[in-house]
C-alpha cells in the first residue's frame, strides 16, 4: 500500500484558509465532511482548494463540490486534473 499521507489534502476556501482535510478514494474523487465545505462558504456546484499535506510548494488543486449531505456530514469532491504523483491504488 502507498503512503496514506499521499492521499491526505487540506481543504481551503477562496482566501487559502484551511478548514479541514479530504482524502482520495480514487484518482479524481475525494471525500470530506459537509461542515468543512460549509465552513469554506462553498456548496454543491461550487469549488474549494486542495493542498497536499506536507507539500512545501503549497500547490492548490481546484476541486468541484460534486455532492453534499448535511445530515450525514459528508461531501464528495472531484478534481478535473488530479496530481500526477497521487499514485492512488484505490
Image: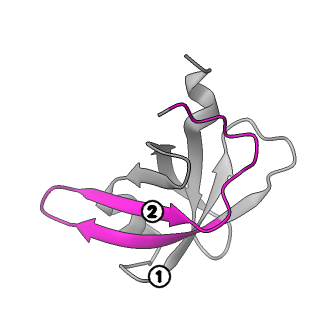
Instruction: Tell me whether circle 1 and circle 2 mark residues in contact (CB < 8 Å).
Output: no
Task: Give the side of residue 86 with respect to residue 56, left or right.
Answer: left
28 or 13: nearer the eye? Answer: 28
Q: Which residue is mark 2?
A: 77
Looking at the rendering, which quadrant does residue 70 occupy? bottom left
Task: Give the side of residue 31 with respect to residue 85, left or right.
Answer: left
- Counting labels gives 2
Which quarter of the image is occupied by the N terminus? top right
**SS at badge 1:** loop
Task: Give the side of residue 59 with respect to residue 1, left or right.
Answer: right
Q: Label 1: how many residues lie within 10 Å, few (<14), some (14-19) or many (20+)? A: some
Which of the two discs, 1 and 2, labels the residue nearer the N terminus? 1
Placement of 1 over or under 84, stated as above or below: above
Instruction: Give coordinates of residue 26: x percent, y percent.
Output: 48, 45
In the image, which residues are magenta? 62-89
Instruction: Give coordinates of residue 76: x percent, y percent.
Output: 37, 60
43 or 80: nearer the eye? Answer: 80
Q: Which residue is mark 1?
A: 46
Placement of 41 over or under 68, stated as above or below: below
Determine the residue positioned at 58% across, 49% down.
10
Q: Residue furthest left?
A: 71
Determine the residue positioned at 63% across, 76% down.
14
Instruction: Give coordinates of residue 56: x percent, y percent.
Output: 85, 41
Determine the residue positioned at 66% across, 56% down.
82
Q: Give me the C-alpha separation between circle 1 and circle 2.
A: 10 Å
Task: Give the side of residue 11 with respect to residue 30, left or right.
Answer: right
**SS at badge 2:** strand
Placement of 58 over or under 37, stated as above or below: above
Instruction: Give coordinates of residue 6: x percent, y percent.
Output: 64, 32
Amino acid at each position: 500500500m502507498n503512503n496514506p499521507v499521499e492521499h491526505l489534502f487540506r481543504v481551503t476556501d477562496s482566501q487559502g484558509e484551511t478548514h479541514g482535510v479530504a482524502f482520495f478514494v480514487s484518482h479524481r474523487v475525494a471525500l470530506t465532511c459537509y461542515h468543512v465545505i460549509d465552513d469554506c462558504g462553498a456548496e454543491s456546484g461550487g469549488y474549494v482548494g486542495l493542498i497536499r499535506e506536507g507539500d512545501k510548494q503549497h500547490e492548490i488543486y481546484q476541486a468541484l463540490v460534486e455532492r453534499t449531505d448535511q445530515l450525514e456530514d459528508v461531501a464528495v469532491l472531484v478534481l478535473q486534473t488530479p496530481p500526477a504523483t497521487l499514485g492512488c491504488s484505490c
